[in-house]
Image: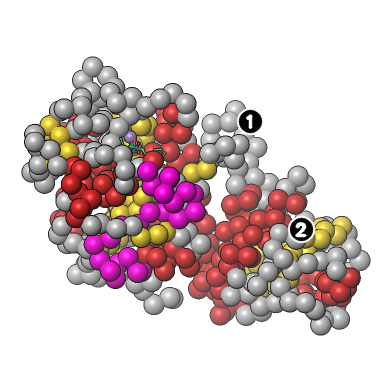
Amino acid sequence: MNFELKRLDLATAAAEKCDALLVLVSGDSCAGKDALSVLVDQALKAGDLETKPGKLLQVYRAPGLACTRAVLLGAGDGSAKQVRQAVAAGVAAIKSSSVKRLAICFADAPTDDGVRAALLAVTEASYVYTTTKSKPEGRTLNRVVVGVANVAARKPQFERAVAAVKGIEYAKEWANRPANYATPTLLATAAKALAKYPRVDCSVLGPKEVAKLKMGSFMAVAQGSDEPLRFIVLRYHGAAKAQAPTVLVGKGITFDSGGISLKPGADMDEMKFDMSGAASVLGVFRALAELQPAINVVGLIPACENLPNGRAVKPSDVVTSMSGQTIEILNTDAEGRLVLCDALSYAERFKPRAVIDIATLTGACMIALGGVRSGMFSTSEELATALLAAGDCALDPCWRLPLDEEYAEGIKTNFADVANVGARAGGAITAAKFLQRFATKYDWAHLDIAGTAWKSGPAKGATGRPVGLLLDYLLAQTPSK
Ligand code: BES
Ligand code: MN
Ligand code: ZN
């Protein structure tokens, strides 16, 4: 899809040739004398257009307008959230018609966040998964023009928004793929494909190299599947070598059956999304490749399947992690923390400024926060504050949960340094406490995206979260170009 930022007010938007024109309206009148301004003003005065987000009025081949359809949209207070709601409703209204070229204009000047929200909503609402359809009917929309008064002033934020959209769509694509189309090996291929962009490098470790690193915990999860594990190392170097990188660690369980602690059958297909953390790392790198910001970032993805074959790890097995700590595996379904802990140890070698892991880690986090906010844990006040702010700004919010030492009581055991599960209560926090033992050498945050990475039901599919949050967090380190 193509995006263009263009100088448009309502008068010039009226002359813009396109299949559909979305007009966002948040004020209660429109002063211009051109056909579109008059239309908006009359609709407002007659009460046929309300500015509440979600309210809309459609017109077809209206005199004085070059577009085929115009959709007047209530944009509420013009905030990012309400613009997103408005645009989503607008795109839904024209979805049945084959709109190829779409233009969006604002009757009242939007914020930069409003412009980004409009782009996110258009791409979100028009997204179609096609990879494993025999007759792929993709999205018809191929060109989006966004009209603003001052193109030069809006350009940097617009470019960020376009990069975010590309990153989000890349993450969605990989998270949505069925498990047999997104094996650890295929994930590694996707990561390697990103190395064709400037400043991006990728190396991939297989079972032999991982054994040499003594990642006994990661290997224990992988050993129940015939599909070989991969440990993916992505690097983006946009700043001087001396500048410490941020390390992102994405859980890459390409299918989570639970292992010997087998999950129930209902909805087990959704465990193909258990590599959504990994997909978000790929998505962030796709966006960095696009934007080329002056920062250093490392992406680590421990990728494997969690399956129960004859060699699979069993409840009661004790394994030795890369850190040297021994782990008693009491439940093979708590595998995410087992692959992440070794990646967190590996992250030490980069002397990072911060490490953030991203994981569909616990059903408990989904129960606690639902699908609105991701769970966030951090050992650094500064990092926690920055992640909260980035999430709110990107409309990809998170919420901080505690790390009190008392929560670690449940993972004590007589047979190893730590157990991989505690009691059911507070399960998202015990999981975080487990990870914290391996993240002692740097500032660390953990994002539990079990509730936010995908949607269930008829609209089942990946959301691309938290690519938006992570990108905002990373770019806040640079003055905007
Ligand atoms: N991938 C799951 C977490 C999950 C479950 C995410 C449902 C989204 C929806 C994870 O590997 C898992 O199975 N966690 C267990 C941990 C338990 C055994 C302590 C869980 O949450 O039930
Ligand atoms: Mn599991
Ligand atoms: Zn899992």
Q: CA distance from mark 2 to mark 1?
A: 26 Å
164 sits left or right of 93 in the view = left
Q: Find residue 61 and report its horizontal and vertical position in percent.
A: 88, 59
Q: Is mark 1 within 8 Å of ligand 1?
A: no
305 sits left or right of 17 in the view = left
Is 465 a magenta residue? no
Determine the secondary structure under disc 2.
strand
- On the question of residue 200 being in view, the answer is no
Is 374 a magenta residue? yes
Q: Nearer the viewer, residue 423 or 327?
A: 423
35 sits left or right of 470 in the view = right
Which sits earlier in the primary sequence, circle 2 or circle 1?
Answer: 2
Identify residue type, mark 1.
Lys
The residue drawn where x is 23% and y is 17% is 310
The part of the image, by quadrant, that contains residue 390 is bottom left
Residue 135's tag is 1
Identify residue type, mark 2.
Ala
The residue drawn where x is 26% and y is 39% is 423
Determine the secondary structure under disc 1.
loop
* Residue at image mark 2: 20
The part of the image, by quadrant, that contains residue 197 is bottom left
The residue drawn where x is 47% and y is 48% is 370
Q: Nearer the viewer, residue 144 or 452?
A: 452
Residue 481's tag is none
Q: Find residue 347 and report its horizontal and vertical position in percent.
A: 20, 53
User: Which class describes the residues within 10 Å of circle 2: few (<14), some (14-19), or many (20+)?
Assistant: many
Q: Find residue 88 and report its horizontal and vertical position in percent.
A: 66, 56
Q: Nearer the viewer, residue 374 or 93?
A: 374
The residue drawn where x is 36% and y is 32% is 256
